Image: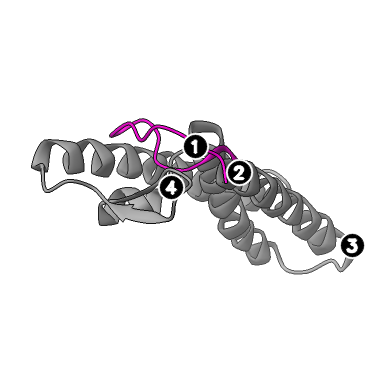
């Protein structure tokens, strides 16, 4: 395991975990594209395009987590991993608030991407 320095609201996972999240996020985005193509090939009803928002949400969330080296789940639960196993943040409310704010911003942008991406596929692509 590699060492890293936990920075509240900035970084709470190792490079290894960040790389894994980016890889999984890319797979989710490819799955979203594959789903759109499948809907076209099978000539499914337009409403199916809304489902595209789910892998878009997951893909964007995981990509943002990987790029920022920040786990939303850890941030919301006061946890971090410096490569020595998962640990709890200090009982300092200011530190925990920084982590929650960062986690909420990642969730906000992921939700926007999922909702608007799904709506775009529903309205424009059919």
Spot the residue most to the right. Answer: 41
Q: Residue at x 49, y 37 (%)?
A: 3
Q: Which residue is mark 4?
A: 71
Quadrant of residue 99 within the rendered picture = top left
Using a 10 Å C-alpha cutoff, classify the residue at mark 2 as few (fewer than 14 neighbours), some (14 to 19) or many (20 or more): few
Which mark sits nearer the N-terminus, 2 or 3?
2
Q: Which residue is mark 3?
A: 41
Q: Residue at x 41, y 40 (%)?
A: 106
Which mark sits nearer the N-terminus, 4 or 1?
1
Cα distance between the residues tagged 2 and 3? 37 Å
Q: Please, what secondary structure does the residue beneath circle 4 have? A: loop
Quadrant of residue 7 within the rendered picture = top left
Residue 78: x %, y % from top left = 25, 52
**44 left or right of 119 in image:** right
Which mark sits nearer the N-terminus, 3 or 1?
1
Which mark sits nearer the N-terminus, 2 or 1?
1
Q: Which residue is mark 2?
A: 16
Q: State which region is magenta.
A: 1-15
Cα distance between the residues tagged 4 and 2? 12 Å
Q: Please, what secondary structure does the residue beneath circle 3 have? A: helix
Q: Is residue 6 magenta?
A: yes
Using a 10 Å C-alpha cutoff, classify the residue at mark 1 as few (fewer than 14 neighbours), some (14 to 19) or many (20 or more): few
Q: Main secondary structure of the magenta part?
A: loop
Which coloring applies here?
one colour
* Foreground tag (3 vs 4): 4
Residue 122: x %, y % from top left = 63, 53
Residue 35: x %, y % from top left = 76, 60
Q: Which residue is mark 1?
A: 3
């Amino acid at each position: 395991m590699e060492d890293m320095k936990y920075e509240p609201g900035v970084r709470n996972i190792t490079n290894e975990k960040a790389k894994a999240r980016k890889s999984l996020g890319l797979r989710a985005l490819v799955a979203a594209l594959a789903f759109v193509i499948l809907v076209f090939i099978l000539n499914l009803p337009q409403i199916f395009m809304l489902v595209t928002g789910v892998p878009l949400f997951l893909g964007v969330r995981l990509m943002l987590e990987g790029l920022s080296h920040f786990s939303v789940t850890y941030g919301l639960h006061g946890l971090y991993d410096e490569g020595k196993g998962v640990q709890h943040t200090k009982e300092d409310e200011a530190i925990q608030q920084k982590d929650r704010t960062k986690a909420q911003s990642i969730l906000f942008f992921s939700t926007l991407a999922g909702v608007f991406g799904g709506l775009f596929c529903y309205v424009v692509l059919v």
